[in-house]
Amino acid sequence: MIASEWLKLRSVASTYYAVGAAALMVVLGAAWSLYVGALADERGSVRAAAPEEGFLPLVQISLAVIGVLAITVEYGTGTIRPSLTAVPRRRALLLAKAAVVTATTAATGFIVIFTTYAVSHLVAGDRAVGYNAGSIADDLPSLLGSVLSVTVPALVGLGLGVVTRSTAAAIGSVVGLLFVLPGIAPYLPPPWNVRIGAWMLPNLVPQIAGDRISTRLEGVLPPAVAVAVLVGYAAVALAIAFVVFDRRDA
């Protein structure tokens, strides 16, 4: 079953486009490092977002598309019916899809994020001080949190794809979770802007890494809780998807 789902994912051209879009992070990260390095030479020092942080949304939305299309392509082409005929145990079928999406997006995210980190340090050299100065040991929690943060939207996309049966609706919902709701949270009255904002998807990675600035804010989550909340997004989406997929006609 896993092999069958892996074959389906590989047979869709959009999978390669999504992975290619995510891999652009490496190129953009190198260009950003050159730019920041030039500013550091000119000004003596500079602080800016590390490329593996600044371009993380590109990877998140690109890999979320893989999760969405893993199911909506079958609904769109009608191949979901033969799939259910071959595997009548619907929960097992969805579990296989989730496993393949998890493995694919986690591996892609790991390679892209860690390659971007290595390339940016190589390009910036000593000039990395002030914008991406930590050693790999210091930055590892943030990097691993970033890998988790690109896997979760893919699983959320898979769950939303099952519920909506629509590529546009599922991708639009993921975009809302990644960009729209976090953009609204700061405009809520205090202290709810910080308390609710701390639970938003884009704000969880800094908390996983124990970001010193974030930890001074009221309502910030401890690293373990931030990990649990991040995983919870995927768990809730998939739980709803399992119920809907098991009860609804194809």
Image (spheres, rainbow, N blue to C red):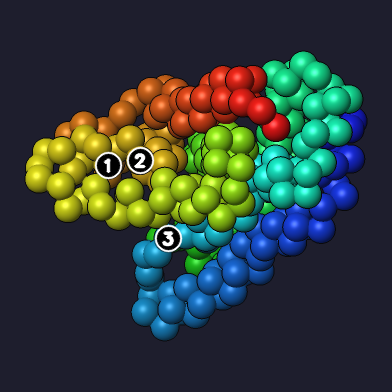
The residue that label 2 is drawn on is 200
- Sequence-wise, the earlier of marks 3 and 2 is 3
* Residue 49 percent coordinates (x, y): 42, 60
For residue 153, side relative to residue 181 (left or right): right
In space, the residues marked 2 and 1 are separated at their CA atoms by 5 Å
Q: Does residue 227 sit above or below 177 in this rendering?
A: above
Residue type at numbered disc 1: Gly
Q: Residues within 10 Å of mark 2 (few under 14, many from 20)?
A: many
Q: Is residue 207 visible?
A: yes
| Of labels 1 and 3, the one closer to you | 1
Using the image as rendered, state which of residue 134 and residue 94 is in the foreground: 94
At 41% from the left and 41% from the top, the residue drawn is 201
Q: Assign the N terminus to one quadrant of the image.
A: top right
Q: Nearer the viewer, residue 185 or 35?
A: 185
Q: Secondary structure at mark 2?
A: loop
Q: Position of residue 23 (x, y in %)?
A: 69, 60
Q: Is residue 103 above or below residue 109?
A: above
Q: Quadrant of the C terminus?
A: top right
Q: Circle 1 is placed at which residue position?
A: 197
Callout 1 secondary element: helix
**Residue on which disc 3 sits:** 49
| Label 3 environment density (alpha carbons within 10 Å; few <14, some 14–19, many ≥20) | some
Of mark 1 and mark 3, the one earlier in the sequence is 3
- Give residue 75's quadrant in the image: top right
Q: Nearer the viewer, mark 3 or mark 2?
A: 2
Which quarter of the picture shows residue 225?
top left
